[in-house]
Image (cartoon, rainbow, N blue to C red):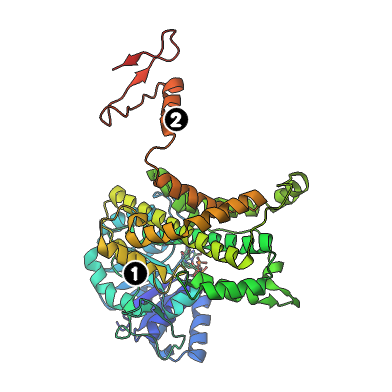
Amino acid sequence: PTSDIGLIGLAVMGQNLVLNMADHGFDVAVYNRTTSVMEDFIKEVEAEQPSASRVHGHAELADFVASIKCPRKIVLMVQSTAVASTDRDAVDKVTDQLEPLLQEGDLIIDGGNSNWNATIRREKEYAAKGIRFFGSGVSGGELGARFGPSLMPGGDPEAWESLKPIWEAIAAKVDRETGKPIERFDPSNPVTLEEGEPCTGYIGANGAGHYVKMVHNGIEYIDMQLICEAYFLMKQLIGMQPDEMSQVFARWNEGDLDSFLIEITTDILQQRDPTDPSRFFVDVVLDTAGQKGTGKWTSISALDMGIPANAMAEAVFARCLSAIKDERVAASEVLRGPAEAVDFGDQGEFIENIREALYCSKICAYAQGFQLMREAQNEFDWDLDFGQIAAMFRGGCIIRARFLQKITDAYAEDPKLANLLLNDYFNEAVNKGQAAWRKVVSLAVLNGVAVPAFASALAYFDSYRTATLPQNLLQAQRDYFGAHTYERVDRPRGEKFHVDWPEENRPQLTL
Ligand code: NBP
């Protein structure tokens, strides 16, 4: 055997990950169900890639497996469609084919966006057959896969030791001092471990890596939606042109909001329509968003566990609302908004208010994402290191941002932090920005501009900081119509009471 690692599934992600591994000096065996895809890839690599000699194509699965050094490490980058733990998809098909060819201790790493429930099931099922199954989130799209993704591996901790050198080598790197991503798009000179800290690390057992990757995607949904709302306010209320907004985003990218998504937004807003350069590109893009499901899974997980991650759900619903374009167009002819516009005052000041509203909302969204992971670790018996997770998100992935360093710092100060909002830095940041945030949400509401993510994040903040919410009345209602019982403020928690509401002589206290 000559190859250090093998990879199955040569679509866009698989190909780029192979090239990344080869650039870092690893010999990679490759296999694809459709052989011609593998052959075309090898031809392309030989023609264009300096590390071509390290990529070895195999048409037969048995030859592919035999060519990998033991214990074998085989990465799957195939389509994943399983949602429930019992669903079987391409990942299982490939693993079932591999199983008779593998030896005890060999390692399969599913690098796709598999649902964590399927990964938990697979890890157990294949462990019983002597195969160590790993689920590793890979974030950063094709460019990330090619030049350094954020990698979130979950599985057997011993198996991680044999995967670690490769995962650390190919992961994105951040500056050890500043936490800023080190980006270099030069295959012959990849960023090394000596130069920066890798955006990977052992996340936890079985499905932990895929769960964290899913929450990353949920956060990505809300991050994108918040930016869209900032854009929408500048467009609808101020009437700014895309190139003017691009300058605003460029400025924002120099401060607390410094992030990949703000950076690409800056680029997008100055882009002209390729078919008609007199128009801006963003103005010709249809306003209906697609989705592949990880935002929905995050929201479903939040609902299942009873964690108020309303920002993620709001971002998913915002995409759903955008998708019913025809209905919205018809409704726009019938339904009227406010009769008069409410003035936003000084333009420069209002733009700064929007920036603050965006930052405060973002803090709430991340607070929710981390609360979700905190609950998941109890639910699935993982031991997650939240500071390390935030650190891994700093480079390579779509949500990479300067702000993540603050999250790492917050958990370094207090690993058991109940909510990010309770950390001094975030508490002060929200305190400083909340007047602007409230003003922006109010003006949006008064002018009939939908800002679901800004508004729901604010509602989350206001609910979270309120000692007594109106659910006392709700509990009374539940007790009235369903005899669901209620607890009393003057009695110990957990003690249940009920009033015999329909009776003539109510209220009767039943102890
Ligand atoms: P796709 O998700 O489009 O999957 C295509 C690959 O799966 C091809 O190599 C195909 O082989 C293989 N495949 C299928 Br489909 N069914 C198979 C089966 N029954 N047996 C063996 N191979 C099978 O590729 P992708 O977009 O590169 O994504 C790969 C994974 O990475 C997915 O889980 C995706 O969700 C995840 N991901 C994607 C991105 C992204 O930006 N695209 C980012 C992060 C994660 P064939 O050539 O024979 O059809």
Of residues 385 and 84, the one nearer the viewer is: 385
Q: Determine which quarter of the picture holds residue 102.
A: bottom left
Measured as percent of width and height from the top left, residue 323 is found at 64, 54
Task: Reply above or below: 297 against 268.
Answer: above
Q: Determine which quarter of the picture holds residue 66.
A: bottom left
Looking at the image, which residue sits at the far left? Answer: 158
Task: Reply above or below: 169 against 488.
Answer: below
Of residues 405 and 347, the one nearer the viewer is: 347
Measured as percent of width and height from the top left, residue 142 is found at 49, 74
Choose the circle earlier in sequence order: 2 or 1. 1
Label 2 sits on what residue type?
Leu
For image coordinates 43% across by 55% down, the residue present is 364
Label 1 sits on what residue type?
Ala
Compared across the picture, whether 2 is left or right of 438 comes to left
Mark drawn on residue 67: none
For image coordinates 27% across by 55% down, the residue present is 382
Q: Element type at marker 1?
A: helix
Mark drawn on residue 391: 1
Measured as percent of width and height from the top left, residue 319 is found at 59, 55
For image coordinates 44% across by 85% down, the residue present is 184
Of residues 447 and 374, the one nearer the viewer is: 447
Q: How many labels does the image show?
A: 2
Q: Determine which quarter of the picture holds residue 9.
A: bottom left
- Which residue is tagged 2? 474
Nearer to us of marks 2 and 1 is 2
